[in-house]
Image (cartoon, rainbow, N blue to C red):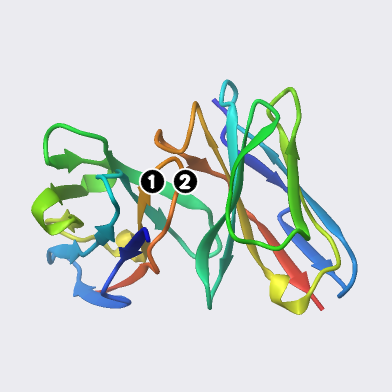
Amino acid sequence: KAGVTQTPRYLIKTRGQQVTLSCSPISGHRSVSWYQQTPGQGLQFLFEYFSETQRNKGNFPGRFSGRQFSNSRSEMNVSTLELGDSALYLCASSYRDLNTEAFFGQGTRLTVV
Amino acid sequence: AQSVTQPDIHITVSEGASLELRCNYSYGATPYLFWYVQSPGQGLQLLLKYFSGDTLVQGIKGFEAEFKRSQSSFNLRKPSVHWSDAAEYFCAPSDYKLSFGAGTTVTVRA
């Protein structure tokens, strides 16, 4: 069965712009979570969605937001981009919650210039 | 506060030699425990998981991990390393929210 699909794979944006990243989970999985990976901070949890509701969130500013659709696909939005937002953004899907296996996509590499 | 520590930032091992990666966690109650591997520029692949029961768990690619409650540890091991095992390894406890250690980069020398 198909894995987690993230689009686009690479993105270059200018400071101050906003960006939307997309994640299609494994069929049947209802939990989608997002992570930011940078060399300095490592892997950090952004938020988790389940049945179109944000169920958990990490310690990121309000510029980072997300949503989930009825088909479990999720989008993540970052507004007013800063240079420090340059990172690999990873999406993961789980059948029920993050205490079950999370399967990760290949990630979206965002570069802010 | 909850935390996870991977004390070794980088490990170099010879092909065919054994490998052990350390992980310690600090949680109020025993979390669910995972090990993930990441190759350069790629996403994370789940190697194995511990929920309860047997303290030695087997994973993919010949990896195993031992859970020790008294030491709050969940160390990853492989008896004989292959060149393709060169990657970054992450220990990840979860209490309904995955947290990741800083990662251990494994280099395999011929």
Q: Which amino acid does label 1 sit on?
A: Ser
Are dots 2 and 1 on a single chain? yes
Q: From the image, which quarter does the C terminus of chain B lie in?
A: bottom left
Q: From the image, which quarter does the N terminus of chain B lie in?
A: bottom left
Per the image, the residue denoted by label 1 is B94
Q: Where is residue B10 in the image (x, y as percent from the top left)?
A: 31, 77
For residue B68, say whether it is visible: no
Instruction: Name the foreground residue: B40 vs A16.
Output: A16
Count of residue discs = 2
The reply to whether callout 2 and callout 1 are in contact (CB within 8 Å) is: yes
For the point 12% across and 66% down, which residue is it?
B17
Q: What residue type is labelled 2?
A: Lys
Q: Residues within 10 Å of mark 1 (few under 14, many from 20)?
A: some
Q: Is residue A105 left or right of residue B89?
A: right
Compute the Cα span from label 2 to label 1. 5 Å
Q: Position of residue A48 (x, y in %)?
A: 60, 42
| Residue B97, numbered circle | 2
